[in-house]
Amino acid sequence: MKKRVFSGIQPTGILHIGNYMGAIKNWVSLIDSHDCIFCIVDLHAITVPYEPGDMQARIHDTAVGYIASGVDPARCTIFVQSDVPEHAELTWYFNTVIPVAYLERMTQFKDKSAQFHENITMGLLDYPVLQAADILLYKADVVPVGEDQAQHLELTRDIARKFNNMYGSTFPEPRTLIGSAARVVGLDGQAKMSKTLNNYIAITETPEEIGKKLSVAMTDPARKRRSDSGNPDICNIYMLHTLFTPGGQQRSVAAGCRSAGVGCLDCKKILAEAISTELKPIRERYEKIKNDRDLIRSVLDQGAQRCRAMAQETIREVKGKMGLLR
Ligand code: AQP
């Protein structure tokens, strides 16, 4: 039996190189060795203000982005969270085992509460419980995510443990799998690269667009003139080189920055080329399938069908243990 992998991304905008390097590339590496389930988590995306009229287009674009990035639907399961109502049902059962104080401690809740302080919803507080339900509904063994999700995964294990203690052994404690690109910083050089912060390079951007965005991106702030030597260790552009640029070229960029032999503009041009090379096949696949509504519908329908059957089985077991099954 293959171990099961579960992970997901919110349909909050076009996928960016942070999502790709932090999560999706890892997903693709597990696709043949594991039973992989990849979700488009629309119920999470409605925990902050959003435009309902855009939601279906965003779900479509996210599915296209997954497939274009190498998440081959013939070798894994892709589905939309709200197509399987059992996610919300299991969340409710978990709400009865997890103390509110655990949720109030979550860093993402604190950050998003500050960002959306005019209406901090119950859904925003409950976000990590829904995430735990996503993962445990399928009894996943491994969850590949970026570093920002590590705290939520710890909470998922807490919930599994508490449920098992209260009602008997039911859920495994899933392992967090964080890849080498644990936290890709945005082009502002400060915050995590993020769809809503608009500090990203999308996986579909052309070499020209990538070059333009990089040309105004933050570098080592202490390097003011071309003749100043720079410090690649604190430069966000160099961090991106470590993810995209081949080793030899990467080392010569770092040495050139330290000796002031390579200026920031040249360094950014090399990076733009390296990112464009990595994204080229993704962009080409994206263009090829982006209007194929039948393909996307059939992938998501098949995924929902498989997941619904698995989810119903877990819910039956949970209801039985909680004394809710007639
Ligand atoms: N900058 C990042 N570096 C590494 N990993 C990242 N991930 C996101 N940004 C980075 C990983 O991508 C997966 C899905 O993220 P999500 O869309 O569900 O939510 P998010 O983490 O909040 O991503 P965004 O882009 O920041 O979305 P918005 O702006 O809508 O909140 C996760 O595995 C995450 O770790």
Image: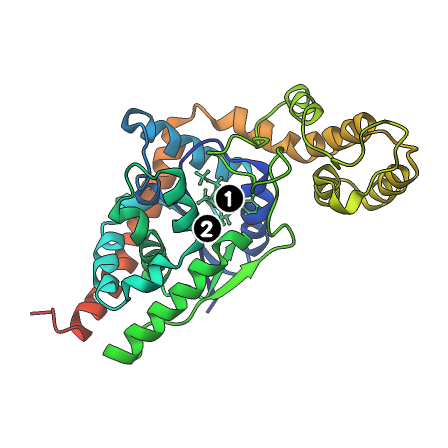
* 232 over 5 or under it: above or below: above
In the picture shown, does residue 52 fall above or below 255? Answer: above
Label 2 to label 1: alpha-carbon separation: 7 Å
The residue under label 2 is: 76
Q: Is residue 223 left or right of residue 193?
A: right
Identify the secondary structure beneath mark 2: loop
The residue that disc 1 covers is 72
Q: Where, by quadrant of the figure, is residue 102 drawn?
A: bottom left
Instruction: Confirm whether residue 63 shows in the render.
Output: yes
Q: If the image is split into quadrants, where does the C terminus sit? A: bottom left
Residue at x 52% of width, y 56% of height:
144
Contact between labelled residues 1 and 2, with CB atoms less than 8 Å apart: yes
Q: Is residue 72 left or right of residue 228?
A: left
Query: The disc labelled 2 sits on which kind of residue?
Result: Cys
The amino acid at mark 1 is Asp
Query: Which of the pair 300/91 is nearer the observer?
Result: 91
The extreme left residue here reads 326
From this view, report whether residue 214 is shown above or below residue 28: above
Residues packed near mark 1 inside 10 Å, few (<14), some (14 to 19) or many (20 plus): some
Percent x, y for residue 197?
50, 33
